Image: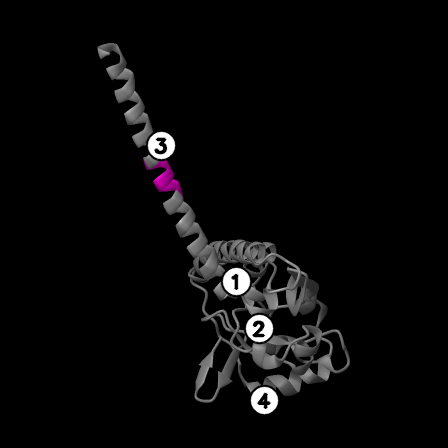
């Protein structure tokens, strides 16, 4: 009977270990389900589609957010470093009304074109021409105040930031002498980026390719002015 005691003790230890592992797995599963539940609550209404798994939609949305944040962090750092290399911005100041009047002369004759102003300081959209909401299939107030990088396909965020470092951009005032800007203002600095529309097909966000031609200017809104 004494020879059976060690195995019995060994079995007891093994059972205790299994119980501990099961408890840890149960706790992990509980925390995972809690996190997924919170993701579902935070899932934008346009990402909720009938006939698709809510959990899968939530996880895809979370993955997209992670990629977006990573792209923003890496690219904005590059933007900030280049901006600090002693470049001074000496720009003409425009009001939103002036910007709207000038750009409308060009966009009305080019129905597949729209103008948008993005703040260097905040990265947010501060102006969008009327055609922008039509081409992007959403209301202008949905675009106003949105982080522009969030409208871009994640893989295009670095393209946007690398092509819009303040020291690299031509002054907009020097390129508006005619309805059609000079070739050196439009061709050299152009880039292609995919911008999302306000439509979701299934659970996937839809993006449309646009050629962006960036300029720099100081835009005055009420009593404030920012580049």
Quarter of the view holding residue 25: top left
Q: Which residue is mark 4?
A: 97
Mark 2: which secondary structure? Answer: loop
Tell me if residue 146 can be seen. yes
First-in-chain label (4 vs 2): 4
- Residue 71 image offset from top left, x and y in percent: 51, 55
Q: Nearer the viewer, mark 1 or mark 3?
A: 3
Contact, mark 4 vs mark 2 (Cβ under 8 Å): no
Q: Which residues are magenta?
A: 20-25
Give the quadrant of the N terminus.
top left
Q: Residues within 10 Å of mark 3 (few under 14, many from 20)?
A: few
User: For this view, does 102 lie left or right of residue 40?
Assistant: right
Near-viewer residue (27 or 170): 27
Mark 3: which secondary structure? Answer: helix
Q: Which residue is found at the position 48% from the left and 65% from the top?
A: 41
Tell me if residue 188 can be seen. no
Mark 3 → mark 2, Cα distance in angstroms: 69 Å
Near-viewer residue (30 or 57): 30
First-in-chain label (2 vs 1): 1
First-in-chain label (3 vs 2): 3
Q: Nearer the viewer, mark 2 or mark 1?
A: 1
Near-viewer residue (215 or 19): 19
Q: Which residue is mark 2?
A: 171
Mark 4 → mark 1, Cα distance in angstroms: 26 Å
First-in-chain label (4 vs 3): 3
Q: Which residue is found at the position 69% from the left and 65% from the top?
A: 210
Mark 1 → mark 3, Cα distance in angstroms: 57 Å
Q: Is residue 93 above or below residue 193?
A: below
Q: Nearer the viewer, mark 4 or mark 1?
A: 4
């Amino acid at each position: 009977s004494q020879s059976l005691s060690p195995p019995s003790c060994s079995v007891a230890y093994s059972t205790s270990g299994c119980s501990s592992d099961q408890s840890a797995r149960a706790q992990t599963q509980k925390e995972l389900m809690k996190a997924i539940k919170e993701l579902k609550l935070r899932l934008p209404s346009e990402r909720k589609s009938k006939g698709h798994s809510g959990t899968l939609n939530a996880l895809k949305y979370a993955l997209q957010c992670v990629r977006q944040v990573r792209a923003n962090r890496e690219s904005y750092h590059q933007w900030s470093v280049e901006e600090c290399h002693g470049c001074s911005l000496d720009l003409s100041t425009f009001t939103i009304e002036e910007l709207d009047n000038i750009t409308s002369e060009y966009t009305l004759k080019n129905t597949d074109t729209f103008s948008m102003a993005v703040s260097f300081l905040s990265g947010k959209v501060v102006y969008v021409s009327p055609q922008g909401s039509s081409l992007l299939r959403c209301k202008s107030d949905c675009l106003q105040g949105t982080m522009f990088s969030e409208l871009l396909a994640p893989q295009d965020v670095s393209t946007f930031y690398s092509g819009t470092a303040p020291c690299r951009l031509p002054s907009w005032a020097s390129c508006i002498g005619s309805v059609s800007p000079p070739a050196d203002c439009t061709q050299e600095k152009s880039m292609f980026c995919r911008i999302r529309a306000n439509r979701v097909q299934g659970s996937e966000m839809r993006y449309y390719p646009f050629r962006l031609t960036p300029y720099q200017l100081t835009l005055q809104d009420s009593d404030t002015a920012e580049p």
